[in-house]
Amino acid sequence: MDRRQFILSGIALGAASSLGIYGWHSSFNENNDNRDLVLSALLPALLYAALPQDTTMAEQVNRTKAAVSDFMPFLAKRQQQELQQLFNLLANQVTQLALTGHVTALAQLSIAQRWQLLIAWRDSYLAVLQQAYHGLRELLFAAYYGQPEHWQALDYTAPKYR
Amino acid sequence: MNHLDASQFLTDQHFTTDVVIIGSGAGGGIAAEQLSNAGFKVLLLEEGAYYKREHFVMEERWAYPNLYQEGAARKTKDQAIGILQGRTVGGSTTVNWTTSIRTPQPTLDYWQAEFGLDFTVAHNLKPYFQFAEQRLNIKQWALAPNANNAKLEYGCQQLGWQYTVINRNVSHCANLGYCGMGCPIDAKQSMLVSTIPAALQKGARLISRLSVRKLVWQDDKIQSLEAVPVDAHFQPTAAVKVSITAKHYIVAAGAIGSPALLLRSKVPNPSGRLGKHTYLHPTVISGALFAEDINGHSGAPQSIYSDQFVWPADSSQLGYKLEVPPIHPVLMASKLIGMAEQHAELMKSFNQLQVTIALMRDGFHEQSQGGQVSLDQEQQPVLDYPITDYLWQGMRQALLSMAELQFAAGAKQVLPLHHDAKLYNSWAEAKAGIAQLSLTALRQTVVSAHVMGGCNMSASADKGVVNQNGRHHQLSNLSVFDGSILPTSLGANPQLTIYALVWKHCQHLIAELTPVLEDSSFRE
């Protein structure tokens, strides 16, 4: 575990112990459910005003989630582990309190509360939370705007040469 | 069959050759052709895949994961600088924006003063610039610049700033604008379509999807190298082992990959400079909204640059070069600031967006000594590049210059890519706003497309890793032939410098190796 993983774990551990919960441990294991849960909560907030507010929204969110899953294995293993740890911590009922400031599960927060959470990370004095904000932001925007189905608002199409 | 895909190997493999070249980018590509032409048996190794014209898709979602290091999401250790670096046959030359500039004379002068490197007489680079320009059809871009570049040109004209029409390595270019995703019509004269096919024609062999993990050495010689195939996501695997023995070893894996390989191999490093003094041309970005369409995705991505600020009269000041990038959806969406409505609104102006970049000329000042490559738990490289106050000051100046230029070119609004910035409506407003920005890591967006240094050339062994011919100071049958040998950044896009230096280095190497290899006892 390197220093930044240690800090991220430390935040979560602090929260767990202050609640009197023992036996908590940080996990780098890939857990698709956790990733899915966190992306389902954050994508509608980050992409608010880009996502359509109709029945096609779920389709666009799902397409973006699939793009994130497809892309992540190309990252350095180190980066993959850090992202996975963030997803695991955020999905965990105990540790998410430390990262979100809310007892409520991420999915139950209003869109406005999710924005506040992202802004709090961006402006945090902890470098690791700033990195979480910028890392997720880049990953999710790239995944969304990489899909030709999402280019209508841009008035852009990619050329085809064959 | 002179191409092998290592990911198809089912059993351990061993190869023997005269010269093995690790990396097929600007350095490895030139070396492969030169050495093959000279009659040597050449084995060229590449970690990326052998993608060609027919494979290239003009979509970032395909190009970035398949053609770039770490899916084009490579970052410095603190995540503050994003790094675009190629990882495919042809290396970064397959995906670069074709800008070809000779090494600036003040850079060569600085290398002479600080590192004892004399490129004036015997080592004069001028003929090698000419060879490379001829070989790769490097010529001034004759068509009109696209609107994105034209705004840079017009802003310079309005302000009386220096600007230059760029020389590009293209032949029958259709002015498409997708150079960063692999040229779909083989117009770009990258290593992929020039020197590598020529070398293969002469009998060189290419192994793609192979990651070299270690050079095995004893006394003053490399004995062999150890490599493994990569998986479908370009991660090294342990399934089979590949070993290669050669008379001479050329490391050309780029300015992050080459130091990483030498660090993994624990080669002698008495100067202590291996993997250190890594330079990036750290780059800041300024967006501008125009009333008319710019369509920065279309047309030659770079055709104009301005050197107005590269060599300031006060040499203690940080210099920076002004250029523009191509504007594609993922590149823009991931770098534009904000989220939700703010971000979505900016993306709706995608076609009206002009983008200017300023590349900091790092490495010429005591407060600008670059970064350091180290190895993570996976033995993969990670670059720590601390941004000093000196660099931040230069970046603020650059943000000011770019805003001034964009308003002079007729922008309605200007947006420095900083997470506290907003759209400024006038030069006066931008000037006041930029002065207030807190320039710190992550809040200020910083990117790089030029990685240099880490195995620098030097006349004496105590100031560098390789000598003036790219030969390792301690290991006699090892050369380093890529951007890692540059002792500072360049103040210019690096491909032509690497072509010329490596071309020159090859002539020296050929002269030295020929008698050795002609000795029949070396040939089976």
Image (cartoon, rainbow, N blue to C red):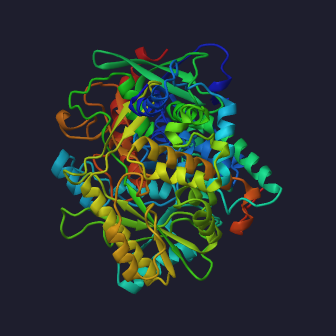
Q: Is residue B459 left or right of residue B503?
A: left
Residue that protrudes farthest toward the right in the picture: A55
In the rendered structure, the answer to whether residue B304 lies left or right of residue B281 reads: right
- The percent coordinates of residue B53 (x first, y second) are 68, 49
Q: In this view, does B436 lie to the left or right of B249?
A: left
**Viewer-closest of B388 and B524:** B388
Q: In this view, does B284 lie above or below B427?
A: above
Place of residue B446 in the rendered image (x, y in percent of width and height, measured from the top left): 42, 55
Q: Residue at x 34, y 25 (%)?
A: B477
Rendering quarter of residue B87: top right
Q: In which quarter of the image is the N terminus of chain A?
A: top left
* Quarter assignment of residue A157: bottom right
- Location of residue A11 (image quadrant): top left
B254 and B235: which one is in front? B235
Residue at x 47% of width, y 66% of height: B167
Q: Can residue B106 be seen in the rendering of this structure?
A: yes
Quarter the C terminus of chain A occupies? bottom right
- The residue shown at (75%, 47%) is A63
